[in-house]
Image (spheres, grey):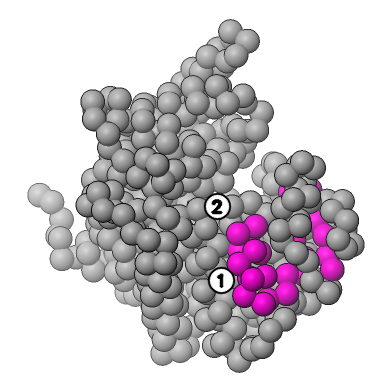
Amino acid sequence: MRNSNSRSEVTPNPYEMAVAQFNSVSDRLGLDEGMRRLLSMPKREITANFPVRMDDGSTQVFTGYRVQHNLARGPAKGGIRYHPTVTLDDMRALAMLMTWKTAVADIPYGGAKGGVIVDPKALTDRELENLTRRYATEISILIGLEGDIPAPDMGTDDRIMAWIMDTVSMHRGYSVPGVVTGKPISVGGTAGRMEATGRGLLYIVQEATAYRGLSGDGLTVAIQGFGNVGAVAARLLHRASYKVVAVTDVSGGVYNNRGLNPDALLQHKRPAGQLLGAPFGDSLTNEELLALPVDILIPAAVGGQIIARNASTIRAKIIVEGANGPTSPEADAILEDNGIFVVPDILANAGGVIVSYFEWVQDLQSFFWEEDEVNERLHRVITRAFRDVVHMAERDRCSLRQSALLLGIRRVVEAIGVRGIYP
Ligand code: GLU
C-alpha cells in the first residue's frame, strides 16, 4: 500500500484533516470562537519516552502517547495503536474522532486515543509484554475505570489488553477489569467484542444498501484491509450473501468477479503472512481495489487512503468507512460530486466502541450477557445512529459525514453547555 509505511507528501496530516472536518460544520452550528478553540484541541496529552529491556539484554527507548480530546459526556474512550507510523498528530485526530463517534452512537463517553511508535511484529512476545506493561504504567496517570478506558486498535489485541488490565490491577492491589475493553472473556471481556467492528459494518451495509435501493443477494463488495476489521467484515458479509469480490492487505490482494471465500483467504494468509499471491483469482494492488466497479467499497486499513489523487477513480456506489480517517476532505468533495454515498467512519465503524461500552457496563455490574444479547443491542444502537444521521442529512440536505459531525458535535456542545464552565 503506497502510503502505509511513510507519510508521503500526498497523505494529508490527520490532525489538520480532523480540524478541517470540524470547521466544516462549526459555522452551521453557529459555534462561538471559544467553543471552536476548545473543541479543535485535545484536553490533555501525554508523551512518554520509556525504556524496554529487549531479549538480547539491550535497552531500547520507545515513544508512546495518550491523548484525551474531550470528557464532557463521560470517561474518555478510545483504542491504543501500535504502529511504526504513529505520530502525536495521529493521536490528536483519532481522539477527536472518538469524541464524535461516541456522541453519534449516543453512548456516555468522551474521546481518547493512544499509541506507541513500534512495529509489534518485530518484537518477541516477551518484548511486547515488557513494552505494554511499561507503556501502561507511563499512561496510568490518565487511564482508569472512570476516567479513560483504552481498547484495541491497529496492532493491538485482546492479549495486550489483558496485560494492561493486569498492570493497572497490580498497581491498585485488586482486579480492575473495567479499565480496558476488548479483553479476553476469561478476565472480564464480553462475548461479541472481537467481531464487533466488523459486525457493525455488516449492519451498516445492510442499512445503507436498503436506503439506496440496492437489494438482493450478490451485491458486490471490495474490502481494503484484512485485519480484525476487514477480515471479520468479509466473513460476515459473505455469510449474509454479499459477494466479496476483492480484498487486499498491505501487500496487495486478490480479485475474482465470481466471489471469494474469506475463510479460504484467511487460511492462506495465516501461514503465508500476506494475501498477495492467494490462488483464488487475479492479483491486484490497493489502488486497483479502490477503483473497482463494485456496489460497496469498504476501506478498512490505515487512514489517508482515499485522497484527491485517486478519489475520481472510485466507481463504487457506496463507501462504508471501516478505517478511521480513510478519506481526505478534498477526496470527500470529489466523492460527493460524483454521487457516491459515503457512510463516514464515526458512524460506520462505531460497532467496536459500542460493544466496548457493553463490556464496560458488564464489568461494572460483574454480570455478563450472552452473545445474542450483545449483538442484538449492537444492532439496535448502530441502526438507530444510522437512521438519526440519515434523517438529519435529509433535513439539512447534506452528506452523511456532515450530518454525523453535526449530530455528534451538537451533543458534545450541549453537554458542555449544561455543565457550564468551572469555576
Ligand atoms: N479502536 C476502536 C475505534 O477506533 C475501538 C475503540 C474502543 O472500543 O474504545 O473505534
- Residue 81 in view (yes/no): no
Q: Is mark 1 within 8 Å of ligand 1?
A: no
The residue labelled by disc 1 is 202
Badge count: 2
Residue 239 within the magenta-colored segment of the rendering: yes
Residue type indicated by callout 2:
Pro
14 or 71: nearer the viewer? 71
**Residue 296, quarter of picture:** bottom right
- Of helix, strand and loop, which one carries label 1? helix
Contact check, label 1 and label 2, Cβ < 8 Å: no
Q: Reading the chain from its start, which is encountered first: label 1 or label 2?
A: 2
Q: Label 2: how many residues lie within 10 Å, few (<14), some (14-19) or many (20+)?
A: many
**Residue 188 placement, left or right of 87:** left
Residue range corresponding to the magenta coloring: 230-256
Q: Residue 371: where, in percent of width, then height?
A: 42, 61
Q: Is mark 2 within 8 Å of ligand 1?
A: no
Identified at 27% across, 34% down, the residue is: 175
Q: What is the three-letter code of the residue carrying label 1?
A: Leu
- Mark 1 neighbour density, 10 Å: few (under 14) some (14–19) many (20 or more): many
Mark sitting on residue 14: 2
Q: Position of residue 143 (x, y in %)?
A: 31, 38
Q: Image height check: is 307 above or below 61?
A: below
Choose between 105 and 23: the one closer to the eye.
105
Q: Residue furthest top?
A: 57
